[in-house]
Image (cartoon, helix red, strand yellow):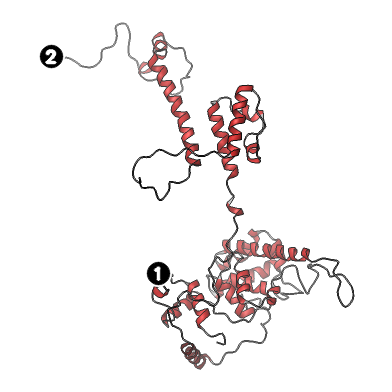
Amino acid sequence: MTKKSTAPQAAPGRRLTRAAVKRPANTSLDITKTAEETNLEDSPTISTRREKSLKRKRSAIVTKVTAAESPPPSANNNDIGKKRKRAHPVATKEEEDVKNNLLSWKSTGTPGQLAGKSAEGAVSSESELSSLEDVHLEEKIEVAIEASIKANRPNKANKQKKTNPYNLTPGTTPYPDYPHPTPEECYTVNKLLSAFHGEQSAPSTPPIPSLNVSGCGEVPSILDALIRTRLSAATTNKNSSAAFSGLVREFGILQSGTGKGSVDWDKVRRADVRDIFTAIECGGLAKVKSQDIKAILEMVYAENNEAAAARTTTMEDDNNNKPLLPATNNNKNNPILSLDHLHSLKSSQEIMSHLTRYPGIGPKTASCVLLFCMQRPSFAVDTHVFRLLQYLRWLPSSSGGGSGSGVVRLTEINAFRHVEVRVPDEL
């Protein structure tokens, strides 16, 4: 018996060609249709499919906007893991105004007066509405509502920074139940170090600025000390000193006023951040440090100008009855770029809070400025000191040093908070 073929047979008088099986990709969509194709498209099945496709597209847009508006599900919901319908979002007053005005445009042909700044920014004129002619009216409404929602979202840049980002608590240790170091232990370590390195005493005044060594704040100017210490962070003394020498070569030396003999920080402030980056590139971490230095100088400049503007020019000096001048670059006793007014603050904690407001300045950098520049008692803790404190067992071995059920992590900042309280100030 011969096996019959099961392949489909071509209709009589018609040959199956590649063009008949598959339409080329570059074929236009509006080519002449055969009678067969026309009858198929006009059939009720094909029309229903088109309607369903359009409905799916509109439903996808509505779902997207609804998802953006809807709040996250409540943590107290007991139906976790079950399918549940998304709650319909409650429209705000501005969103309702946008929808009502668009609906009035549908009935009257002219858009109404949109309320609210965000609504005006989303759809502000008839020309903007006409650009959406190829979109269904319901889609126009959803687009306008989404634009209004975006306009009303809070800007992250406008959020207020925390006043105490490092959770510094003067006079209080994060490990109140941990008894070390005791004053006796501190004096013993000081005696051993003095026997090895010799007796050390703090200088009566900070030394003059060095142009070869960045240091950790051993200069008279607080602003100069702050930026030098920022340069020395997370790198070696050799690298930080090379970076500081690059600033000296690029921007020159201040010849008078507070900070005399160090870098002219006002020239650095007025320079492009890329020039600062190039000057300190050899020191490592140049990208973030150049941005921090630029931001610190701009902040100090703005603060000094604000303080100068607050002074009234009608105030007269008690001695010569001349009006007091605001701070300017020409006023050597009170230059426009200065943090020396912090000397007037009695509380070291106030100074610490002020310094840690600047970008890139943490408790360690601020502590160095307090100790070496302002000559106030402070126990700076960096990576090396942190390791030695653990070796001496002046810190708890784990996070169990806290009181109660609270868990306090063992970090450099918490170590600073602890030894700042436990170590006597005279050491």
**Residue occupying the point 81% across, 69% down:** 330
Q: Which residue is mark 2?
A: 2
Q: Quadrant of residue 213?
A: bottom right
**Residue designated by label 1:** 405
What residue is at 46 percent from the left and 88 percent from the top? 185
Q: Spatial distance from mark 1 to mark 2, Cα to Cα?
A: 88 Å
The three-letter code of the residue at mark 1 reads: Ser
Q: What secondary structure is found at the residue carrying circle 2? A: loop
Q: Quadrant of the N terminus?
A: top left
Give the residue displayed 70% in from the left and 68% down from the top.
265
* Pointer 1 or 2: first along the chain: 2
Q: Secondary structure at mark 1?
A: loop
Q: Position of residue 113 (x, y in %)?
A: 67, 32
In the figure, 346 relative to 289: above or below? below
Instruction: Residue at 61% x, 34% y: name it.
Output: 97
The x and y percentages for residue 292 are 61, 63
Q: Is residue 205 in sight in this rendering? A: yes
Is 386 drawn above or below residue 78 in the view shown? below
Viewer-proximal residue, 125 or 381?
Answer: 125
Residue 260 position by quadrant: bottom right
Q: Nearer the viewer, mark 1 or mark 2?
A: 1
Taking depth in this image into account, of 291 and 399 the one nearest to the observer is: 399
Q: Considering the image in quadrants, where does the C terminus appear? A: bottom right
Residue 189 or residue 420, whichever sits in front: 420
Number of the label disc, if any, that sits on residue 388? none
Quarter of the image where one finds residue 114: top right
